[in-house]
Amino acid sequence: MPVAYIEDIARHVGEEVTIRGWLRHRRSSGKIHFLVVRDGTGDLQAVVSKGTVGEEQFAQSAALTQESSLILTGKVRQEARAPGGFELDVTRVEPVQLAEPFPIQPKEHGVGFLMEHRHLWLRSSRQHAILRIRHEIIRACRSFFDDRGFVLVDTPIFTPNACEGTTTLFQTQYFDETAFLTQSGQLYSEATAAAFGKVYCFGPTFRAEKSKTRRHLMEFWMVEPEVAFAELPDMIDLAEGFLSFIVGHVLKTSRNDLAVLERDLSKLERVVPPFPRITYEEAIALLQKKGNPIQRGDDFGGDEETLLSSEFDRPVIVHRYPAAIKAFYMQTDPSRPDLALCMDVLAPEGYGEIIGGGQRMHDHEQLLARIREHKLPEEAFRWYLDLRRYGSVPHAGFGMGIERAVAWICGLDHVRETIAFPRMLYKLYP
Ligand code: 4AD
Ligand code: MG
């Protein structure tokens, strides 16, 4: 019998096929069992009648528990009343394994309990929808850069130096040296941009953030373009095009999954260029007007980002923060040396920062002075300084955290559901 996936079921109407999956739930009435089966690609209602399958298989069906694995053979029929529009008239039932009582029942469970059972929670239709959208977001990230001539050059995870400041490094042993888990591929992408012109890297990044917020993970995935001969305005335009493309792609491919999440599509449909652009100083004035106690020179926390991003109906780009509160590698504004040529993109609906980036310092002497000011180990940055000795050019890039983007596009209130196995503060299981 041909094996079919539920997502292709419409092509098999009138045919007999085999479906392999797991039981979501069973409802029985006299001589009929209704089995709702999922196979990872969709759900299908299967009708098992005693008259067709015989006493033994009918009794086996009655014993099937939630999440039991099974193989069903039957004829596909169009059925307007069934969820999904099709039903399977079963001719053969083969249980594969009878599941023990499943911990996650179709009722409300606390988040703590669900997180402890994350390995099983992934089977729920909501988690399924989120992770499928994540997959489409990643596909869109890759296509966007691939179609524009960027070369994917991945960067290392073990590193001898910090990229985003030393306070959030995970330290590990690398034979007889100390190594750190990377916080960002950027520094290495600056080297590959000088080799390939336009590059991006995409991989896991690590931050020992001692903050328990709805936006922070200890391990998250970041996609980071880096472009030689590019400056801050080029990155602002690139980020705008990039985010519009991703949202457009998800709206095209993921309507059903967005519906499972009850996402308000009109909010996503507004994500088209031009995005508003404001300076850090304008952002401070706006926050103060809204009654936030922030002072010029302060960095934004979650509250400020939420407040700012709720002011706009599409992502807002905030640029030119004080150099003093930004990373060591940022180019300063020639007309205002106290400001960095950097930008953050804040997602709408209060989601806060999803992209950070800007122009990199390309002058050797200035960069060396910065490294010393920040008391960074010069020796570990020798290779990075070399990039300023051999054909240095203005260059710029940015990084987008995949999980933050997924939380926003899916409309979730916490990043913990945006990745299959989130690494959170003091939480390493499962
Ligand atoms: O703003 P960040 O720290 O920028 C960088 O790492 C640059 N080196 C990137 C570059 O220019 N190539 O981080 C970039 C993005 C943030 O905007 C956010 O989306 C995400 O990474 N991010 C986190 N996501 C989840 N959990 C965390 N703890 C995150 N920290 C940053
Ligand atoms: Mg940032």
Image: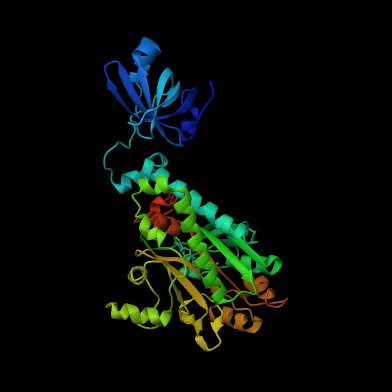
Specify the color scheme: rainbow
**Is residue 156 depicted above or below 128 in this figure?**
below
**Is residue 14 depicted above or below 296 in this figure?**
above
The one nearer the camera, 378 or 212, is: 212
What is the residue that sits farthest to the bottom in this orientation? 335
* Residue found at x 52% / y 53%: 138
Horizontal side of residue 426 vs 375, given as left or right: left
- How many discs mark residues in the rendered view? 0
**Is residue 414 depicted above or below 84 in this figure?**
below
What is the residue that sits farthest to the right in this orientation? 390
Q: Is residue 294 visible?
A: no
* Residue found at x 31% / y 18%: 32
Quadrant into which the C terminus falls:
top left
* Residue found at x 51% / y 75%: 327
**Is residue 391 depicted above or below 154 in this figure?**
below
User: Residue 300 placed where, x, y %?
Assistant: 38, 74
User: Residue 263 placed where, x, y %?
Assistant: 35, 52
* Residue found at x 45% / y 69%: 345
Q: Quadrant of residue 186?
A: bottom right
The one nearer the camera, 378 or 157, is: 157
Q: Is residue 109 visible?
A: yes
User: Residue 324 placed where, x, y %?
Assistant: 47, 81
User: Residue 85 placed where, x, y %?
Assistant: 38, 33
Q: Quadrant of residue 280?
A: bottom left
The one nearer the camera, 271 or 409, is: 271
